[in-house]
Amino acid sequence: MAGVPEPLLLLHGFMQTGRGWDEVARHLAGERYRPLAPDIRGHGAAATRRPVDMQSCVDDVLRLAGPRFALAGYSQGGRLALHVALARPQRVSRLVLVSATAGIDDDAERARRRAADEQLASWMEQDGRRMSEVADRWGAQPLFANQSAAVAAAARADRLSNEPAHVAAALRGIGTGAMAPLWKRLGELGGLPVTVLAGELDPKYVALGERLARSVPRGELKVVPGAGHALVLEAPAAVAAALEAA
């Protein structure tokens, strides 16, 4: 029906919640979209949902989305968004991937990442572990080194909405180390328009973004000047503009 806003599913990053998309949603102009930013299993209101695995998370998104929807995902949410789009490409009208990857395609490298993720998950689950410790360790990564104090504080506040045992389950179940790589399947997206966003100060994900954009039939990379990995917090207006333009 003309004039009815299209559902826009916004999938958050690891150790965040759907609230991480609030500023992006606020910058969306007009009535083109009806933004929906669910908490992913292991996080926020969905923390206790089990199992935490990619198929279950895909099913959650598809149940929420309706018959036809636009889709965007940041980091962990970008990986999930790719799984959703590949599962039901006919239902997705457009796809925006923010600071995302299609997985680690080198078997040895993926095994090392899986082992590192398991070590971190076990540390999170230690008796008496506080979420503040977990949030601070995650936020101290070089990936987030260029964030302003305000962005870092907002990211930390969102992380504190979670609990160590539940984010540990998410790391084991849908972390990069657990994810089967999707690079060889990206051609299946066919005519789906795909916009890939990466921050200028995040060279690893600029390179991954270039590869993603080349690997899909209708891919386009947009590099956001002066921003790092957490674009939904660092440059929400730019992310919203990319969604409007998609």
Image: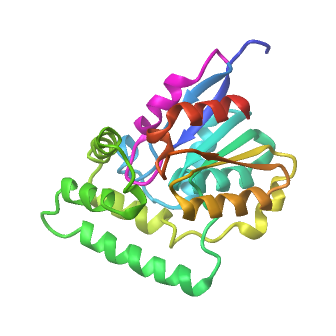
In the rendered structure, does residue 22 fall within the stretch colored magenta? yes
Q: Position of residue 222 (x, y in %)?
A: 68, 46
In the rendered structure, does residue 159 fall within the stretch colored magenta? no
Q: Residue at x 51, y 83 (%)?
A: 111
Image colouring: rainbow
Q: Position of residue 206 (x, y in %)?
A: 61, 58
Q: Is residue 214 left or right of residue 234?
A: right
- The foreground one among 42 and 112 is 112
Q: Is residue 110 above or below residue 183?
A: below
The mark total stands at: 0
Q: Is residue 49 left or right of residue 70?
A: left
Q: Is residue 1 above or below residue 217?
A: above
Q: Is residue 62 left or right of residue 171?
A: right
Q: Residue at x 69, y 66 (%)?
A: 182
Q: Quadrant of the C terminus?
A: top right
Q: Quadrant of the N terminus?
A: top right
Q: Position of residue 145 (x, y in %)?
A: 37, 57
